[in-house]
Amino acid sequence: MIIPVILAGGSGTRLWPLSRELYPKQLLALADDNTMLQNTILRLKDIEDMGDPIVICNENHRFMVAEQCRKINVRPESIILEPVGRNTAPAAAVAALKTESEGKDPLLLILPADHFIKDVPAFHVALDTGISYAREGRLVTFGIVPETPETGYGYIRKGEKLTADTEESEAVVIDAFVEKPDSDTAAEYVSSGDYCWNSGMFLFRASALMTGLKKFAPGIVDACEKSVQQGKEDLDFFRLDREAFEACPSDSIDYAVMEKTKNGAMVPMQAGWNDLGSWDALWQVGEKDENENVIQGDVLTHDVNNSFLHANARLLAAVGLENHIVVETSDAVLISPRNRVQEVKSLVDKLKAAKREEAFSHKKIYRPWGTSEIIVVSDRFEVRRVMVRPGATLSLQKHFNRAEHWTVLRGTALVTKGDEVFILREDNSTYIPLGVTHRLQNPGKISLELIEVRSGSYLGEDDVIRFEDSHGRQAH
């Protein structure tokens, strides 16, 4: 059995303003209609002996991860919630420990959730090669055959070729892991043919990983064992113990094990791989028009070339641009030369330092029951468009500082207001006075859409007292 372990805990700050802390790039549809997470899972279809995935994510993203899996008809073996980020080695360790606790020793296929792979059949061929070595007990990584000198990736130097069943294969011994080089060194690496990009994808038997971690990083093993043993099931999720996991050393699989083991192997892969780590990377993989522009959304151009233009909420019009990135969302616009997009992270750092909401969330906020989108904001009132999924229920709650007025646009609402319970249909409305206990449910088979007008002295999300909640959020 092969268990995919999908690492979905990153933040993707270099793709701001689309990627936000509460809605990172792995949850975005960047290359096609599916999100990066969904494509990572879907490209494993039809591989023999491939089991349901283990997804490891930040607890703040848990409901979005579960919903995106549901939309592609995938039920993960487990969704493991990290209370804090601790890099890839602890994430892989907790996945191995979870399977170990169930009496299994599968092959674990470690995949970041935010990679783009154009040639899926070539990816499958590389996996087949890796599987044969992982079953022999080797720790396998997949190296990307470089097409250009890149300074943003680590490299792996090839050692001697390995053989399987006495036939020569593409797998090689790992000679060395190399840090991100300068441009001249990167050019030398590529021209030599002796190096691959480090993809961050791995394949090994769970017991082989744990043997390596116990030898080279026992502190990670101790902390992860405690975090799993003291963790708990929560609805469809498994929560690692916060205190134990916070005490875990932060390290990558590369540093913790792969650089030290003598049992490693690398499978070179040519599959149109890209980690989509910047807006320029999206231009590279995107479908281009006659002027070498990648255009997404409602965009109008005149004399624009070699650029990436994305409109999310409004018409985007551009004149006379060359080699630029322009990304528009409902609350922010990014403009940058293509060769400086790696500096977007500095902008996000400034937004976070200023505690700007644009660093953390979009105007459309994803909830376990649906979405809430801010339309108008003022000092004492706020207008939102609310969507509640069929069958979903919001918490029984009240607010101390705001009243709410709901008007149904589509679907049917079951409303609890104090001691009353009643139905609202399209064009019906109700008023929830300040301090009154209330709940909203969608009893129908289509999405419920309504306009919510908040009014009061304080409109923040933290003005809520929950009495009952079916989504595992804390009640007071």
Image: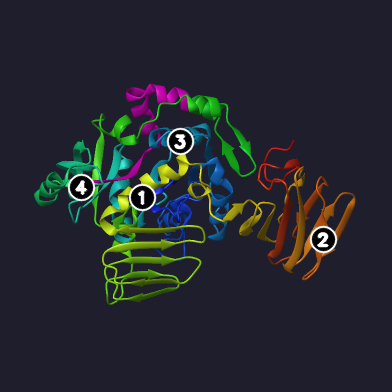
At label 2, the amino acid type is Thr
In front of the other: 212 or 9: 9
- Tell me the element at label 1: helix
Instruction: Say which residue appears at 30% left-offset and 35% top-offset.
Output: 254
Query: Toward the viewer: 350 or 279?
Result: 350
Q: Which residue is mark 4?
A: 196
Label pair 4/3, CB-CB below 8 angstroms: no
The residue wearing badge 1 is: 344
Residue 430: assigned label: 2
Kind of residue at disc 1: Val
Mark sitting earlier along the chain (2/1): 1
Q: Residue 252: which quarter of the image?
A: top left
Distance in Å between CA atoms under marks 2 and 3: 43 Å
Please say if 36 is above or below 189: below
* Highlighted range, magenta: 197-224
Mark sitting earlier along the chain (4/3): 3
Residue 362 spot, x, y in % from top left: 53, 54
At label 4, the amino acid type is Cys
Q: Is residue 391 visible?
A: no
**Nearer mark to the viewer, of 4 and 2:** 2
The answer to whether residue 441 is above or below residue 314 is above
Q: CA distance from mark 4 to mark 3?
A: 27 Å
| Residue 284 drawn at (x, y percent) | 28, 62
Mark-to-mark CA distance, 4 and 2:
62 Å
Label 4 vs 2, first from the N-terminus: 4
Q: Sequence order check: which comes first, mark 1 or mark 4?
A: 4
* Disc 1 versus disc 3: nearer the observer: 1
475 part of magenta stretch: no
